[in-house]
């Protein structure tokens, strides 16, 4: 950022020094030759000087960091400077038009078209081309509207100086061809009028952009590019809202993205981070805020729908089972609620959950919920009268009876408020379909439950051999 600010300040200072030199030359030659075109160019250069000075101070002010009164920074100072440049351009256009009309119809002035006038115009053209290219490069690289306005002024100077040079050539020609060609002497004020029109067009374009950014107008095409980038991120289902505005070199972007509502918070945050990275690739000096909206995916499963509805009420579900009985959908589940709730409060929450679930699944006929507290604590000691060795032996016996399962290890036995919790790791063929692996683990669980009184949960983790 410091390098960018230094580059912008250097460009603004160079333009000030160059314009001061051109003003001195144009005023001197204009007064000596009496050419309104040259004097109009000098006046335009005075305006360029004011614009360059404005740009220099605007760049310095805009680079100040955000503060309590200006949380979005000071970038709009450059837009204000560009608007001031526009007003100066309009005043200059009015003066040039007035003088040109006077010389065309009411107050003829003798003009000396000599080598000095031609020379200063050629120098002005070469200098303006160099400054325009240099300033426009810095402005686009660092997104500076005040420098871009300056570059636009110098680009206009190239055209206007060419017109004045052409006018001086016609005046010189009229002086060489004789009195009958005296009407060509009017080419100088006519050229001045054309200069005024060119300056007027450039000033209105600059003012239009300055006012647009001051009114937080979105840069043309930026919102579409950002939306396309956001949609390209895997996991983004929609882009329902997007706002973008420019403030000096910085762009402020607020974008909302729709993601699968069954995602975890970490997954949604990861997607939001990828969207932010993509937007910053488009606006490197941007301030990007990504808002995540949960939406229902078309491929959402029934279990995901049930879980999403529960999450909306601050609850969780497990052991979700659905049955289709003669066209009627029956769902049973365990609903985990805040352990500090009373039975009445938990039951009221379950009622709200069932109403919301029926809205989501119109075909739902019956909902059966088993209420249980969330976060019941951790118990690590095995129950009295049962040793870990006895449980391990029983577990290994059950595994040995299921063909396809082997090498039972890491057996863990814990006591919970609802009974024994048993977990273990078993090996199976790595090429086994997951459905078959689940069937084998289910058989192990059933054998353990049948042989171990007081067991509340059996968890078999199947690993590929």
Image (spheres, rainbow, N blue to C red):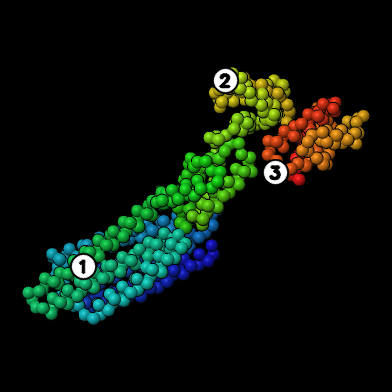
Mark 2 Cα-neighbour bin, 10 Å: few <14, some 14–19, many ≥20: few
Across the whole image, how many numbered discs are drawn on residues?
Answer: 3
Disc 3 is placed on an element classified as loop
Q: CA distance from mark 1 to mark 3?
A: 86 Å
Disc 2 is placed on an element classified as loop
Residue 361 in the image, given as x and y percentages of width and height: 56, 25
Q: Name the disc covering residue 191, or none.
A: 1
Q: Which residue is mark 2?
A: 327
Q: 24 or 221, which lies in front?
A: 221
Q: What residue is shown at x 39% (from left), y 62% (from top)?
A: 148
Indicate the quadrant containing the C terminus: top left, top right, bottom left or bottom right: top right
Residue 346 in the image, given as x and y percentages of width and height: 69, 24
Is residue 17 something that shows in the picture?
A: yes
Image depth: mark 1 or mark 2 in front:
2
Q: Which residue is mark 3?
A: 431
- Name which of mark 1 and mark 2 comes first in the sequence: 1
Q: What residue is shown at x 22% (from left), y 62% (from top)?
A: 97
Mark 3 Cα-neighbour bin, 10 Å: few <14, some 14–19, many ≥20: few
């Amino acid at each position: 950022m410091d390098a960018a600010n230094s580059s912008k300040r250097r460009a603004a200072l160079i333009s000030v020094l160059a314009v001061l030199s051109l003003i001195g030359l144009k005023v001197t030659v204009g007064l000596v030759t009496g050419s309104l075109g040259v004097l109009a160019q000098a006046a335009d250069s005075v305006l360029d000087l004011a614009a360059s000075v404005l740009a220099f101070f605007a760049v310095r002010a805009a680079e100040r960091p955000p503060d309590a009164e200006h949380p979005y920074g000071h970038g709009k100072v450059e837009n204000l400077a560009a608007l001031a440049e526009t007003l100066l351009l309009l005043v200059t256009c009015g003066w040039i038009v007035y003088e040109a009309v006077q010389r065309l119809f009411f107050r003829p002035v003798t003009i000396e078209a000599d080598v000095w006038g031609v020379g200063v115009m050629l120098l002005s053209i070469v200098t303006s081309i160099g400054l325009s290219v240099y300033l426009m490069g810095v402005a686009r690289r660092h997104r500076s509207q005040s420098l871009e306005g300056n570059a636009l002024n110098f680009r206009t100077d190239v055209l206007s100086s060419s017109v004045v040079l052409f006018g001086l050539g016609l005046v010189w020609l009229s002086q060489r061809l004789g009195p009958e060609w005296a009407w060509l002497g009017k080419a100088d004020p006519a050229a001045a009028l054309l200069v005024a029109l060119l300056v007027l067009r450039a000033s209105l374009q600059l003012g239009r952009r300055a006012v647009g950014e001051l009114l937080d107008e979105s840069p043309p095409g930026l919102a579409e590019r950002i939306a396309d980038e956001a949609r390209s991120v895997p996991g983004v289902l929609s882009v329902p809202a997007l706002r973008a505005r420019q403030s000096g070199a910085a762009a402020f972007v607020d974008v909302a993205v729709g993601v699968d509502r069954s995602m975890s918070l970490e997954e949604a945050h990861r997607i939001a981070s990828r969207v932010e990275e993509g937007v910053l690739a488009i606006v490197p000096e941007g301030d990007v805020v990504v808002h995540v909206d949960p939406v229902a995916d078309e491929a959402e499963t029934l279990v995901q729908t049930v879980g999403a509805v529960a999450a909306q009420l601050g609850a969780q579900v497990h052991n979700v089972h659905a049955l289709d009985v003669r066209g009627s959908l029956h769902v049973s589940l365990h609903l985990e609620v805040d352990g500090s709730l009373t039975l009445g409060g938990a039951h009221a929450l379950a009622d709200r959950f069932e109403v919301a679930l029926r809205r989501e699944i119109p075909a739902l006929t019956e909902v059966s919920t088993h209420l249980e507290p969330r976060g019941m604590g951790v118990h690590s000691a095995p129950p009295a009268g049962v040793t870990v060795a006895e449980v391990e032996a029983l577990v290994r016996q059950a595994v040995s009876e299921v063909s396809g399962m082997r090498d039972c290890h890491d057996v863990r036995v814990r006591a919970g408020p609802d009974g024994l919790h048993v977990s273990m790791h078993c090996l199976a063929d790595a090429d086994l379909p997951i459905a078959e692996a689940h069937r084998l683990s289910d058989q192990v669980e059933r054998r353990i439950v049948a042989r171990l009184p007081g067991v509340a949960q059996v968890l078999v983790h199947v690993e590929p051999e």
